[in-house]
Amino acid sequence: MTLAPRKNPLSALVLGLSLLAPALAPAQTSTPPAEAPALRGETCSVEGLMDQIRRGLGSKSEAYKRYLRTLLRESATTLPLEELRAAFEREYDPVMVEHLAAALVARTERGLEDTSLEQVAQRALNDRDPALRAATVRAMRQTGALERTGDMYERLVRDPSPEVRQEAATNLVTDNLEVYGGRHAQAADTAVAAAAASSDPKVTARILGNLMTGEVSADSARKLEQLLGSDSAEVRAAASTALGGVPAAEMASARQAISAQYRAETDPQARKAMLAGIARLGFSSAVPELQRLRDVDPRLAPEVDAWTRVLNMNLQEWSLILSAKQRLSQAR
């Protein structure tokens, strides 16, 4: 049996279109078509964006709210500057203040006028409403504000509002780690100066207990040593932790200061932090010093023995030493 040849569907489609072509062709007219209207550029409206954000605040989607914040920040360089500044100054809703402040900071971050960040810093320091001061501080988080705002953080950690002080501490810790990777001397020195300036032990301890101090200056190292004499055991413990990470040039002085304070210390938790600081400063070379301190407080003799055992393993990374110490403590 002879098979009929298969039809090519593409050929059929072409044929169909050719038959329809006359019907699809535009009608010929005697008058020329009107010209298309010219496109005109339009500047983004600050008020329009703000209205969109206000409506979005009622959304249950946190992702959408983050999008709106990003939208305003990313539009900052194209928005009329004076409108943006005026909107920031007249706004009294904390969430909206934070959005507008972040947009102004973004302008400075992208190489535009320094005065935008300065305006934000002044409101963080001087607004009468602590909720608005705290919101403005949050807007400077994860930016380069640590380098550009002078003694602002030393003043913020003395703010009458606990909320503002804690937001400032969060900025110092977060930015040193996430913006500067713990490798920026000026940022670390700014954090140490703020911690030393604070009269709130919880703020000082929070900053020092979470700060990478491998790039601090000699002056900052001396401030940390002075904080070993704080009236707060929490601060003394945090200062010991911070001193454990100082640069090589400051290690001998730091070790001597911690050892001296250990002998005078009365708080067991602060003493534990001091033993850890000494261990970190010397690794295996700290063993003789730790053994000399063993009988100062018999209650902590097992802690000294644990550090001695771990350091004698000759591990070369502090993270590995900490992990080994933790396993040993859990096994006891």
Image (cartoon, helix red, strand yellow):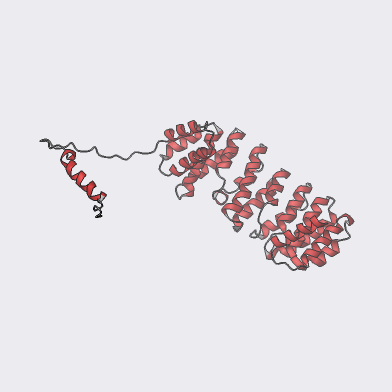
| Residue 84 spot, x, y in % from top left | 45, 37
| Residue 153 spot, x, y in % from top left | 62, 46
Residue 240 relative to residue 183: left or right: right
In-front residue for pair 211/10: 10
In-front residue for pair 1/11: 1
Residue at 58% x, 39% y is 124
Residue at 61% x, 49% y is 174
* Quadrant of the rendered image containing residue 215: bottom right
The quarter of the image holding the N terminus is bottom left
The quarter of the image holding the C terminus is bottom right
**Residue reaching furthest to the left:** 30
Residue 64 relative to residue 130: left or right: left
| Residue 111 spot, x, y in % from top left | 45, 50
In the picture shown, does residue 125 fall above or below 262? Answer: above
| Residue 80 spot, x, y in % from top left | 40, 39
Residue at 45% x, 33% y is 52
Residue 155 relative to residue 288: left or right: left
The count of marks equals 0
In-front residue for pair 113/1: 1
